[in-house]
């Protein structure tokens, strides 16, 4: 099975998890393909950091092969508003695809400090990607920070449903105006309004996909707590039902765990994010009990994502990171605790 959205830790966050441990945990749950997000510490926003991160993934793959287990590691590259940085990321994507699977933009602050705030700035991202003729996937964390209710006490009220819906509409509008040639992916969709916007864009012929997480599929706002806290937050039951139904009617393209482990102390201090692989198994169980057929489950958990990312043959040759590349990358950007 494929998990197209994980936040493995490692480097300066190895106390939370390492890439090897994350892949081992996922493999025990039946997943063997992982797409790792770039809001690491330090973030994957340069060619050097991408090479070092891929090195960790390749090391984990070798460990598993020695045990007779086949796993596959892929990596998102983080986008910033800097046009030169965007060009570097597109170039790195072109050089290292499919090991590098896509680009990622955070349309609000989440874990890490990678938020790109404001529709005008976001429009510049799409315009630059169009100029560079980028045709891969751009995954977006959609929450409009200008609509956050900073004084609210409950996490789900701070980041209300309308903030996601409006951010999704912003991304669709920006991509259209820029002539963006790639696929826009709406990550961890959680609201009925956002899903309707995606469905309308698909009906117009736009290349757009969306994924849903186990927590947004199975849980509603009543389950929210200091521990069960993530971005975007849990939603009212009406939103949860819309996401659930979208898995059956085909409007949601795949299930993604948004696996994001923290230490207990970090959670007690307000960190957002929860481990996700157990939730994926609970979701599979719930969908089977609700009558979903195996062909649809296979599409949601494997084929749809691989096809959208253009990774149709996992046995094909993947660019390998050489010792020279690693040495040069580490000289350019030394990262502590890398292996």
Image (spheres, helix red, strand yellow):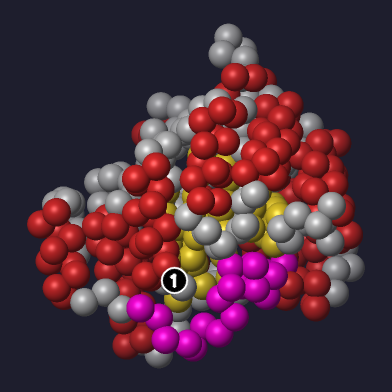
Residue 195, relative to residue 211: is it above or below? above
Q: Residue furthest top?
A: 151
Q: Residue furthest front?
A: 131
Identified at 45% across, 27% down, the residue is 270
Label 1 crowd (10 A; few <14 / some 14-19 / many >=20):
some
Identified at 37% across, 38% down, the residue is 82
Q: Is residue 319 left or right of residue 11?
A: right
Would you identify the image quadrant in which residue 2 lies?
Answer: bottom right
Measured as percent of width and height from the top left, residue 246 is found at 83, 54
Q: Residue 268 versus residue 189: which sits nearer the camera?
A: 189
Tag 1 secondary structure: loop
Residue 312 colored in magenta in the image: yes
Quadrant where the N terminus is found in the figure: bottom right
Residue 218, relative to residue 53: is it above or below? above
Q: Is residue 328 left or right of residue 239?
A: left
Residue 316 visible in rendering:
yes
- The residue at which mark 1 appears reads as 97
Measured as percent of width and height from the top left, residue 332 is found at 14, 54
Would you identify the image quadrant in which residue 142 lies?
Answer: top right
Residue segment shown in magenta: 300-319
Identified at 56% across, 13% down, the residue is 150
Residue 192 colored in magenta in the image: no
Measured as percent of width and height from the top left, residue 266 is found at 38, 34
């Amino acid at each position: 099975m494929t998990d197209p959205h994980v936040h493995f830790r490692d480097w300066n966050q190895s106390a939370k998890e390492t890439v090897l441990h994350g892949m081992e945990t996922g493999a025990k749950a039946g997943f063997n393909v992982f797409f790792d997000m770039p809001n690491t510490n330090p973030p994957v926003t340069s060619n050097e950091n991408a090479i070092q991160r891929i090195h960790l993934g390749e090391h984990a793959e070798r460990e598993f092969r020695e045990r007779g287990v086949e796993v596959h590691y892929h990596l998102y590259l983080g986008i910033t508003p800097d046009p030169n940085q965007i060009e570097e990321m597109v170039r790195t994507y072109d050089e290292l695809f499919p090991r590098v699977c896509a680009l990622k933009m955070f349309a609000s602050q989440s874990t890490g400090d990678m938020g790109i705030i404001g529709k005008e700035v976001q429009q510049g991202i799409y315009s630059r990607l169009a100029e560079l003729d980028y045709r891969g996937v751009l995954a977006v964390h959609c929450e409009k920070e200008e609509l956050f209710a900073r004084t609210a006490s409950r996490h789900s009220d701070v980041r209300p449903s309308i903030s996601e819906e409006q951010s999704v509409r912003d991304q669709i509008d920006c991509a259209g105006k820029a002539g963006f040639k790639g696929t826009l992916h709406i990550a961890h969709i959680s609201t009925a309004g956002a899903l309707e916007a995606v469905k309308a864009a698909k009906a117009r012929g736009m290349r757009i996909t969306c994924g849903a997480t186990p927590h947004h599929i199975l849980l509603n706002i009543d389950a929210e707590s200091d521990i069960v806290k993530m971005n975007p937050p849990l939603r009212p039951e009406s939103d949860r039902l819309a996401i659930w139904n979208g898995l059956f009617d085909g409007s949601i393209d795949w299930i993604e765990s948004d696996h994001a482990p923290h230490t207990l102390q970090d959670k007690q201090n307000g960190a957002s994010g929860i481990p996700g692989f157990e939730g994926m198994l609970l979701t599979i169980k719930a969908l089977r009990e609700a009558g979903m057929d195996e062909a649809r489950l296979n599409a949601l958990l494997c084929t749809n994502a691989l096809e959208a990312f253009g990774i149709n043959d996992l046995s094909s040759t993947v660019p390998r990171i050489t010792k020279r590349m690693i040495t040069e990358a580490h000289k350019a950007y030394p990262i502590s605790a890398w292996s």
